[in-house]
């Protein structure tokens, strides 16, 4: 199915952060757009400024995958039904807005615990903040060598 960039982003927002409230959804949208606009490193090279390439890059967003570890992943963007809220947040992010205090965060994940790792993934991201159930990470200088 050929979704527009807006549709892909709205579906990813719903899938990755639908239960995290407006701030959590804006944080996820901000990470995606930070990757789209990355000045260097892997996301600049792979994404080349494309929302679609960033979202569909293998191994980046569980929600962009129909299978995980060889099994069907029912929590995927194709099964989402975005609402006006998800589209509004996608439009907000595409227009250049970012969540205040999120910096240049390029990663987030749910640790399923009360604490966030200091670095993620490996040494290229450093802990910035926690919003809801997700930990967010800014790039280190090492990221730009990826």
Image (cartoon, grey):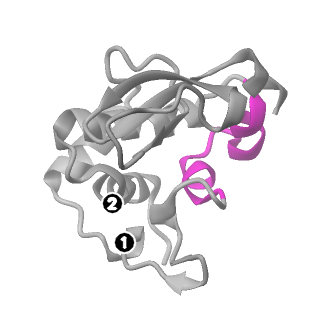
Q: Which SS does the magenta portion mostly show?
A: helix
The answer, for residue 142, to whether it is visible in the render is: yes
- Residue 28 in which image quadrant: top left
Q: Earlier in the sequence, mark 2 or mark 1?
A: 2
Location of residue 105 in the rendering, given as x and y in whole percent from the top left corner: 51, 26
Q: Relative to the observer, which residue lies in front, 93 or 35?
A: 35
Image position of 134 (left or right of 73): left
Image position of 142 (left or right of 91): right
Location of residue 18 in the rendering, given as x and y in whole percent from the top left corner: 23, 53
The single residue placed furthest to the front in the displayed view is 114
Location of residue 98 in the rendering, given as x and y in whole percent from the top left corner: 37, 24
* Residue at point 24%, 69% (across, down): 81
Q: Is residue 48 magenta?
A: yes
Q: CA distance from mark 2 to mark 1?
A: 7 Å
* Residue at point 25%, 37% (across, down): 132
Location of residue 66 in the rendering, given as x and y in whole percent from the top left corner: 51, 77
The residue carrying mark 2 is 15
Q: Relative to the observer, which residue lies in front, 114 or 27?
A: 114
- Residue 116 in which image quadrant: top left
The residue carrying mark 1 is 75
The single residue placed furthest to the bottom in the displayed view is 71
What is the magenta range? 40-57
Is residue 47 placed above or below 84 in the rendered structure? above
**Neighbour class for label 1 at 10 Å: few (<14), some, many (≥20)?**
some
* Residue at point 53%, 85% (across, down): 71
Please tell me the numbered disc located at residue 30.
none
């Amino acid at each position: 199915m050929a979704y527009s960039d807006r549709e892909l982003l709205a579906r990813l927002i719903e899938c990755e952060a639908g239960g995290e409230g407006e701030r959590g959804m804006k944080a996820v949208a901000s990470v995606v757009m930070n990757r789209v606009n990355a000045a260097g490193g892997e996301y600049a090279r792979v994404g080349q400024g494309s929302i679609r390439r960033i979202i569909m890059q293998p191994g980046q967003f569980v929600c962009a995958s129909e299978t995980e570890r060889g099994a069907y992943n029912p929590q995927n963007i194709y099964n989402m039904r975005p609402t006006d809220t998800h589209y509004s947040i996608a439009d907000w992010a595409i227009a250049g807005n970012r969540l205040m205090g999120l910096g240049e965060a390029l990663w987030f994940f749910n640790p399923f615990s009360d604490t966030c790792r200091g670095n993620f993934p490996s040494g290229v991201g450093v802990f910035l903040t926690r919003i809801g159930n997700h930990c967010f990470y800014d790039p280190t200088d090492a990221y730009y060598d990826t």
